[in-house]
Amino acid sequence: MSDSRGAQSAGCRGSCGRYFTSARFLLYLGHSLSTWGDRMWHFAVSLFLVELYGNSLLLTAVYGLVVAGSVLFLGAILGDWVDKNQRLRVAQTSLIVQNICVIICGMILMVVFLYKTELLSMYQGWLLTLCYILVITIANIANLASTATAITIQRDWIVVVAGDDRSKLADMNATVRRIDQLTNILAPLAVGQIMTFGSPVIGCGFIAGWNLMSMCVEYFLLWKVYQKTPALAIKSCLKDNDQELKQLNIKDANSNNSEKPTEDVQLMGEKSVVTTETSKKSLCSEKITEPFHTFQDGWVAYYNQSVFLAGMGLSFLYMTVLGFDCITTGYAYTQGLSGSVLSILMGASAVSGIMGTVAFTWLRKKCGLVRTGFISGIAQLSSLILCVVSVFMPGSPLDLTVSPFQDIGTRFLEGELLPTLSPDGVPQESLTTSIQNLLNTSSLTTTEPDNLIPLTSVSFLFAGVIAARIGLWSFDLTVTQLLQENVIESERGIINGVQNSMNYLLDLLHFIMVILGPNPEAFGLLVLISVSFVAMGHIMYFRFAYKNLGMQLFFCSSSDSRTVTSDQQHGDSSV
């Protein structure tokens, strides 16, 4: 008996050792470090910009618009760069660029916090303005590098590490999402405590030091995963093969021209010089227009994918105020919820999201991948009914007689200047004023008994938002795996880059929607519009699912692991 127990314990230790040294675990560990640093930085940079600009949200708004616009226009180009280069080189380059940019931003912010008065007095304040521009620009580059890292690791490396085992791929995707959910809560909490009990300077130094240490560890982990997974060294190069064919055709044409008699060459000497100059100009123009062609080809390839409707359905879910962002948090303050209550609700939302990842793995095994997305959509829409009901419950500030444009009209009547427009054409002042008004109207709290607001409406609202996270994250994982399984390897980067662009586009539209209806009386209307967009997104997915499964969509079968029909998978995905 003792020998058998010893053998079992040795086998258990051996299996644990193999797991903790496997490429799968090392990938999780690297993703945890990367996500922790990202969440700390994204949380802290907004606070830094607010404090630097005199408790104004202007710099934060500009930063958000720059980030959204950059990913919107450069997502396809970024993904194409991921496709055309070796996996390890892409991962290491994006990792180094991201962390170095964050470190530089941290150092600049430390200098600004320490010497803000001196910088403000130099060159009439232009030096301080230059520091602001540098911080926003470098932070935007860091976000683009982070996007490239997410594309190459979460959309490509995971697929290769999982191999042909789709169940393993689903488990890995779910684990990555659980890591995201935990870091979304714990990382901002940690850096918030450092900034509260320390200072912004200490916070900047801590984040810069963390990214320096994390970069070295993540670099080593990427190399280990690459060494343990030989398949990562093999990358499909369909596009490169096409380029090689074009080059071969050019060489053949040149060789044919070289076979002409020398007399013809001499007679055409002057014309050959002109032709050479013309070819140089054409090559230069091709290099200039190449990013635009890549942008166009990426969107065309995305449209021709067999999972196009599923990806569009996911993007439409970003056009919503039903999440724990600054908009919904500001509205909650106007309804009398305290910061402690909101922190508890955010924790419950994270738990709900983790439950969604568990539901995804269970549903996929029982009903298949496509049906999992359909069921998840029904679950999310059913939960959002509570949000619709909250609009008409006691305590809801909905008042359709109050025009959402009342504040804008008042400004025009009073002869005030138009708000400053950003390069994207979005009014910067109105975004700042809208969010700031929501945050500053916290006087409607329970501290004054005469102004008590019934909590029935806001309770229904957050109950629906939290419950909907289960279906939301399960649906997100479904579409993610559909893209992983059905996009050919040579187009994974550019297709997922365009998918990120679509997500940012709808997210940007939701902020513009808030700008147009900034008052709390219009928030109920924003809720109804948000639910409508979520419903449209799931209708798109239903059309995709019904197109591939037909009436079998309504009958669960674990044996059906098909995601798309074979003719679509091999025919529609090519440009």
Image (tube, helix red, strand yellow):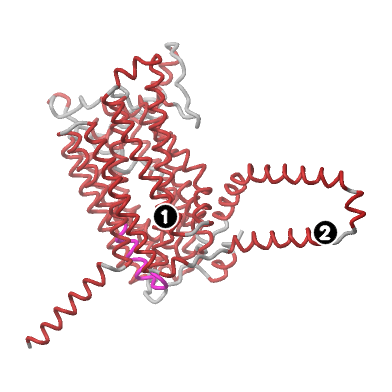
Q: Position of residue 22 (x, y in %)?
A: 30, 68
Q: Is residue 306 magenta?
A: no
Between residue 505 and residue 214, name the one nearer to us. Answer: 214
Q: Is 257 on the left or on the right of 10, as rendered?
A: right
Camera-side mark, 1 or 2: 2
Q: Disc 1 residue type?
A: Ala
Question: Please, is residue 321 above or below residue 18 in the view?
Answer: above
Q: Disc 2 residue type?
A: Ser
- The boundaries of the magenta stretch are 162-176
Residue drawn at 29 percent across, 55 percent down:
470
Of the residues under marks 1 and 2, which one precedes in the sequence?
A: 1
Please tell me in which quadrant of the rendered image residue 553 appears: bottom left
Mark 1 neighbour class, 10 Å CA radius: few under 14, some 14 to 19, many 20 or more: many
Quarter placement of the N terminus: bottom left
Name the outermost residue toward the left.
2
Q: Which mark is residue 360?
A: none
Q: Which mark is residue 258?
A: 2
Quarter placement of the C terminus: bottom right
